[in-house]
Image (spheres, rainbow, N blue to C red):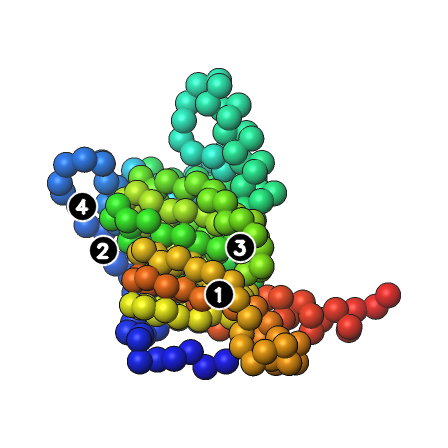
Amino acid sequence: MQPQSPQMQYGGPPQPQHQMVPQPHGGGGIAQQAQIAHVITHGPSFAMLRADLAPGQVIIAEAGAMVARHQPVQMEVKMNAGRSPGFFDKLKAFFIAMLRKVAGGETFFVNHFTAPQGGSVWIAPTLSGQIQHRRMNGEKLTLSTGAYLAHAGEVDMRLKFGGLKALLAKEGAFFLEISGVGDLWFTSYGGIHAIDVNGSYIVDNGHLVGFEGNLTFNIRSAGGGMMGFVASGEGLVCEFSGQGRLYIQSRNLGSLTSWLTPLLPG
Protein backbone atom coordinates (compact mmCIF):
# COMPACT_ATOMS: atom_id res chain seq x y z
CA MET A 1 0.00 0.00 0.00
CA GLN A 2 1.67 3.22 -1.17
CA PRO A 3 0.08 6.55 -0.15
CA GLN A 4 0.22 9.35 -2.67
CA SER A 5 2.94 11.69 -1.49
CA PRO A 6 2.47 14.92 -3.51
CA GLN A 7 -0.17 16.18 -1.06
CA MET A 8 1.89 15.40 2.01
CA GLN A 9 4.36 17.28 4.10
CA TYR A 10 6.44 14.85 6.07
CA GLY A 11 7.54 15.88 9.53
CA GLY A 12 10.04 13.04 9.69
CA PRO A 13 10.59 10.80 12.68
CA PRO A 14 10.26 12.26 16.18
CA GLN A 15 13.49 13.75 17.44
CA PRO A 16 15.37 11.64 20.01
CA GLN A 17 14.70 12.74 23.56
CA HIS A 18 17.54 14.03 25.69
CA GLN A 19 17.59 15.03 29.32
CA MET A 20 16.03 18.44 29.82
CA VAL A 21 16.49 20.92 32.61
CA PRO A 22 13.18 21.94 34.19
CA GLN A 23 12.21 25.46 33.18
CA PRO A 24 9.32 27.41 34.67
CA HIS A 25 6.71 28.60 32.20
CA GLY A 26 5.32 32.04 32.75
CA GLY A 27 2.05 33.60 31.70
CA GLY A 28 -1.46 33.71 33.11
CA GLY A 29 -4.24 31.19 32.97
CA ILE A 30 -3.44 27.62 34.01
CA ALA A 31 -0.79 27.18 36.70
CA GLN A 32 2.03 25.26 35.08
CA GLN A 33 4.41 22.77 36.64
CA ALA A 34 7.99 23.19 35.49
CA GLN A 35 8.91 20.80 32.72
CA ILE A 36 10.23 17.54 34.16
CA ALA A 37 13.82 16.66 33.36
CA HIS A 38 13.85 13.29 31.67
CA VAL A 39 15.78 11.00 29.36
CA ILE A 40 14.52 8.18 27.14
CA THR A 41 16.96 5.30 26.70
CA HIS A 42 17.10 1.89 24.99
CA GLY A 43 14.87 3.10 22.17
CA PRO A 44 13.32 2.77 19.80
CA SER A 45 12.85 -0.98 20.26
CA PHE A 46 12.82 -1.31 24.06
CA ALA A 47 12.47 2.27 25.27
CA MET A 48 12.51 3.23 28.94
CA LEU A 49 11.77 6.63 30.49
CA ARG A 50 13.73 8.08 33.39
CA ALA A 51 12.04 11.06 35.02
CA ASP A 52 14.19 13.18 37.33
CA LEU A 53 11.81 14.76 39.81
CA ALA A 54 12.65 17.99 41.56
CA PRO A 55 11.04 18.66 44.98
CA GLY A 56 7.33 19.35 44.49
CA GLN A 57 7.06 17.73 41.05
CA VAL A 58 4.65 14.86 40.36
CA ILE A 59 4.55 12.35 37.53
CA ILE A 60 1.55 10.05 37.00
CA ALA A 61 2.02 6.70 35.24
CA GLU A 62 0.00 3.65 34.30
CA ALA A 63 -0.13 0.97 36.99
CA GLY A 64 2.59 -1.61 36.46
CA ALA A 65 4.77 0.73 34.38
CA MET A 66 7.38 1.43 37.06
CA VAL A 67 10.73 -0.31 36.56
CA ALA A 68 12.65 1.19 39.49
CA ARG A 69 12.90 4.31 41.63
CA HIS A 70 15.23 5.98 44.07
CA GLN A 71 14.47 5.26 47.71
CA PRO A 72 13.31 8.85 48.51
CA VAL A 73 10.72 8.76 45.69
CA GLN A 74 7.25 8.16 47.10
CA MET A 75 4.41 6.39 45.29
CA GLU A 76 0.68 6.85 45.87
CA VAL A 77 -1.95 4.75 44.11
CA LYS A 78 -5.13 6.52 42.93
CA MET A 79 -8.06 5.78 40.66
CA ASN A 80 -7.54 6.71 37.03
CA ALA A 81 -10.21 9.42 36.91
CA GLY A 82 -8.89 12.94 37.44
CA ARG A 83 -8.27 15.22 40.41
CA SER A 84 -11.80 16.02 41.69
CA PRO A 85 -12.34 15.82 45.48
CA GLY A 86 -15.61 15.15 47.34
CA PHE A 87 -17.73 12.02 47.77
CA PHE A 88 -19.87 12.36 44.64
CA ASP A 89 -16.83 13.28 42.58
CA LYS A 90 -15.07 10.17 43.87
CA LEU A 91 -18.11 8.04 43.08
CA LYS A 92 -18.15 9.47 39.58
CA ALA A 93 -14.38 8.89 39.41
CA PHE A 94 -14.93 5.20 40.16
CA PHE A 95 -17.20 4.75 37.15
CA ILE A 96 -14.88 6.81 34.93
CA ALA A 97 -11.90 4.68 35.98
CA MET A 98 -13.88 1.51 35.28
CA LEU A 99 -14.91 2.80 31.84
CA ARG A 100 -11.32 3.73 31.02
CA LYS A 101 -10.17 0.23 31.94
CA VAL A 102 -12.89 -1.64 30.05
CA ALA A 103 -13.31 0.60 27.00
CA GLY A 104 -10.15 2.69 26.84
CA GLY A 105 -7.45 0.09 27.40
CA GLU A 106 -6.03 1.89 30.45
CA THR A 107 -5.42 0.58 33.95
CA PHE A 108 -8.05 1.12 36.66
CA PHE A 109 -5.42 2.67 38.95
CA VAL A 110 -2.52 5.01 38.24
CA ASN A 111 0.60 5.65 40.31
CA HIS A 112 1.54 9.16 41.45
CA PHE A 113 5.28 9.59 42.05
CA THR A 114 6.70 12.44 44.13
CA ALA A 115 10.13 13.16 45.55
CA PRO A 116 10.20 15.70 48.44
CA GLN A 117 13.99 15.67 48.31
CA GLY A 118 14.35 14.96 44.60
CA GLY A 119 14.91 11.63 42.89
CA SER A 120 14.36 9.58 39.77
CA VAL A 121 11.81 7.01 38.65
CA TRP A 122 12.17 4.66 35.70
CA ILE A 123 9.04 3.82 33.65
CA ALA A 124 8.52 1.44 30.72
CA PRO A 125 5.51 0.31 28.66
CA THR A 126 4.20 -3.24 28.46
CA LEU A 127 5.05 -3.80 24.80
CA SER A 128 8.42 -3.40 23.12
CA GLY A 129 8.52 -0.12 21.27
CA GLN A 130 9.24 3.58 21.41
CA ILE A 131 8.35 6.27 23.95
CA GLN A 132 7.51 9.72 22.63
CA HIS A 133 7.50 12.92 24.71
CA ARG A 134 5.01 15.65 23.88
CA ARG A 135 4.93 19.02 25.66
CA MET A 136 1.27 20.05 25.83
CA ASN A 137 0.49 23.77 25.67
CA GLY A 138 -3.29 23.85 25.53
CA GLU A 139 -3.84 21.93 22.29
CA LYS A 140 -5.56 18.55 21.97
CA LEU A 141 -4.00 15.21 21.06
CA THR A 142 -6.03 12.06 20.45
CA LEU A 143 -4.40 8.71 21.29
CA SER A 144 -5.49 5.22 20.37
CA THR A 145 -6.17 2.50 22.95
CA GLY A 146 -3.15 1.62 25.06
CA ALA A 147 -0.86 4.39 23.78
CA TYR A 148 -0.86 6.46 26.99
CA LEU A 149 2.08 5.91 29.36
CA ALA A 150 2.50 8.87 31.76
CA HIS A 151 1.93 12.59 32.24
CA ALA A 152 2.78 15.51 34.51
CA GLY A 153 1.25 18.93 35.08
CA GLU A 154 -2.29 20.18 34.40
CA VAL A 155 -3.02 17.55 31.75
CA ASP A 156 -6.64 16.41 31.33
CA MET A 157 -7.71 13.13 29.77
CA ARG A 158 -11.15 12.03 28.67
CA LEU A 159 -12.57 9.17 26.66
CA LYS A 160 -13.82 10.06 23.20
CA PHE A 161 -16.30 7.71 21.54
CA GLY A 162 -15.00 6.72 18.13
CA GLY A 163 -18.02 4.73 16.99
CA LEU A 164 -18.03 1.95 14.41
CA LYS A 165 -15.18 3.44 12.42
CA ALA A 166 -12.90 3.26 15.47
CA LEU A 167 -13.76 -0.42 15.91
CA LEU A 168 -13.06 -1.10 12.24
CA ALA A 169 -9.77 0.75 12.60
CA LYS A 170 -8.84 -1.82 15.28
CA GLU A 171 -8.45 0.97 17.83
CA GLY A 172 -11.40 0.00 20.06
CA ALA A 173 -14.62 1.94 20.45
CA PHE A 174 -12.95 4.79 22.35
CA PHE A 175 -10.00 7.10 21.90
CA LEU A 176 -8.22 9.01 24.66
CA GLU A 177 -8.34 12.80 24.18
CA ILE A 178 -5.48 14.66 25.89
CA SER A 179 -5.52 18.42 26.55
CA GLY A 180 -4.13 20.97 28.98
CA VAL A 181 -0.62 22.10 29.85
CA GLY A 182 2.18 19.77 30.90
CA ASP A 183 4.28 16.79 29.84
CA LEU A 184 2.86 13.72 28.12
CA TRP A 185 4.61 10.47 27.27
CA PHE A 186 2.97 7.97 24.95
CA THR A 187 4.12 4.70 23.50
CA SER A 188 3.72 2.31 20.58
CA TYR A 189 4.33 -1.23 19.43
CA GLY A 190 7.47 -0.70 17.35
CA GLY A 191 8.84 2.70 16.37
CA ILE A 192 6.82 5.93 16.20
CA HIS A 193 6.83 7.98 13.00
CA ALA A 194 5.32 11.47 12.92
CA ILE A 195 3.77 12.71 9.67
CA ASP A 196 2.54 16.24 8.97
CA VAL A 197 -0.58 16.02 6.82
CA ASN A 198 -2.14 18.74 4.67
CA GLY A 199 -4.77 17.07 2.54
CA SER A 200 -5.41 13.34 2.73
CA TYR A 201 -3.36 10.42 3.96
CA ILE A 202 -3.93 6.68 4.26
CA VAL A 203 -2.87 4.58 7.27
CA ASP A 204 -3.31 0.84 7.54
CA ASN A 205 -5.65 0.01 10.41
CA GLY A 206 -3.76 -1.21 13.44
CA HIS A 207 -0.81 1.15 12.84
CA LEU A 208 -2.41 4.30 14.26
CA VAL A 209 -0.96 5.73 17.50
CA GLY A 210 -2.61 9.15 17.55
CA PHE A 211 -3.41 12.38 15.73
CA GLU A 212 -3.82 16.10 16.37
CA GLY A 213 -4.93 19.26 14.60
CA ASN A 214 -8.18 19.30 12.61
CA LEU A 215 -7.77 15.82 11.16
CA THR A 216 -10.74 13.49 10.68
CA PHE A 217 -10.80 10.00 9.24
CA ASN A 218 -13.03 7.49 7.51
CA ILE A 219 -12.68 3.75 6.97
CA ARG A 220 -12.48 2.30 3.48
CA SER A 221 -10.99 -0.59 1.52
CA ALA A 222 -7.29 -0.45 0.79
CA GLY A 223 -8.07 -0.60 -2.94
CA GLY A 224 -7.78 -3.13 -5.72
CA GLY A 225 -11.46 -4.09 -5.69
CA MET A 226 -12.74 -7.27 -4.05
CA MET A 227 -9.54 -9.16 -4.85
CA GLY A 228 -7.49 -6.43 -3.18
CA PHE A 229 -9.71 -6.53 -0.10
CA VAL A 230 -9.49 -10.32 0.23
CA ALA A 231 -6.00 -11.18 -1.01
CA SER A 232 -3.79 -8.13 -0.46
CA GLY A 233 -3.49 -8.59 3.29
CA GLU A 234 -4.34 -4.91 3.76
CA GLY A 235 -8.11 -5.15 4.24
CA LEU A 236 -9.42 -1.83 5.63
CA VAL A 237 -7.48 1.42 5.98
CA CYS A 238 -7.99 4.77 7.71
CA GLU A 239 -8.19 7.69 5.29
CA PHE A 240 -7.38 10.95 7.08
CA SER A 241 -8.23 14.38 5.73
CA GLY A 242 -7.55 17.90 6.97
CA GLN A 243 -4.42 19.44 8.41
CA GLY A 244 -2.48 18.21 11.42
CA ARG A 245 -0.04 15.57 12.57
CA LEU A 246 -0.34 11.80 12.57
CA TYR A 247 1.62 9.41 14.76
CA ILE A 248 1.90 5.88 13.37
CA GLN A 249 3.69 2.78 14.65
CA SER A 250 5.95 0.51 12.64
CA ARG A 251 4.39 -2.73 13.93
CA ASN A 252 0.84 -4.03 14.18
CA LEU A 253 -0.19 -5.90 17.32
CA GLY A 254 -3.04 -7.62 15.48
CA SER A 255 -0.56 -9.05 12.97
CA LEU A 256 1.60 -10.36 15.80
CA THR A 257 -1.43 -12.03 17.38
CA SER A 258 -2.37 -13.64 14.05
CA TRP A 259 1.18 -14.92 13.62
CA LEU A 260 1.36 -16.36 17.15
CA THR A 261 -2.09 -17.99 17.30
CA PRO A 262 -1.30 -21.03 15.08
CA LEU A 263 1.83 -21.69 17.18
CA LEU A 264 -0.02 -21.90 20.48
CA PRO A 265 -0.89 -25.37 21.83
CA GLY A 266 -4.50 -26.48 21.96
Could you tell me how far apart the alpha carbons at marks 3 and 4 are, in whole angstroms?
38 Å
Q: In front: mark 2 or mark 3?
A: 3
Mark 4: which amino acid? Answer: Pro
Alpha carbon separation for disc pair 4 and 2: 10 Å
Which residue carries the number 1 mark?
Answer: 238
Q: For numbered disc 2, what is the local secondary structure? A: loop
> Tag 1's secondary structure?
strand
- 146 relative position to 8: left or right: right
Residue ID at (78%, 72%)? 262
Query: Mark 2 is on which residue type?
Result: Val
Q: Distance between the residues labelled 4 and 1?
A: 39 Å
Residue furthest right as drawn: 266
Asked whether the residues under the numbered discs 4 and 1 touch, taking CB atoms below 8 Å apart as contact, a structural biologist would say no
**Disc 3 designates what residue?**
166
Residues packed near mark 3 inside 10 Å, few (<14), some (14 to 19) or many (20 plus): many
Q: Specify few, some or many for label 2: CA neighbours under 10 Å numbering under 14, 14-19, or 20 or more.
A: few
Q: Mark 4 points at which residue?
A: 24
Instruction: Say which residue label 2 marks.
Output: 21
Q: Mark 2 to mark 1: distance in Å?
A: 38 Å
Q: Residue 151 carries which label?
A: none
Q: Which residue is drawn at 39% across and 57% down?
A: 216
Can you give x and y, in whole percent of width and height, for residue 243 in the image?
29, 62
In space, the residues marked 1 and 3 are separated at their CA atoms by 9 Å
**Residue depicted at 64% across the width and 81% down the height:** 227
Of circles 4 and 1, the one toward us is 1
Disc 3 marks a residue whose amino acid type is Ala
Q: Which badge, 4 or 1, comes first in the chain's sequence?
A: 4
Q: Is residue 52 left or right of residue 130?
A: left
Q: Is residue 146 above or below residue 159?
A: below
Nearest the eye: 170 or 28: 170
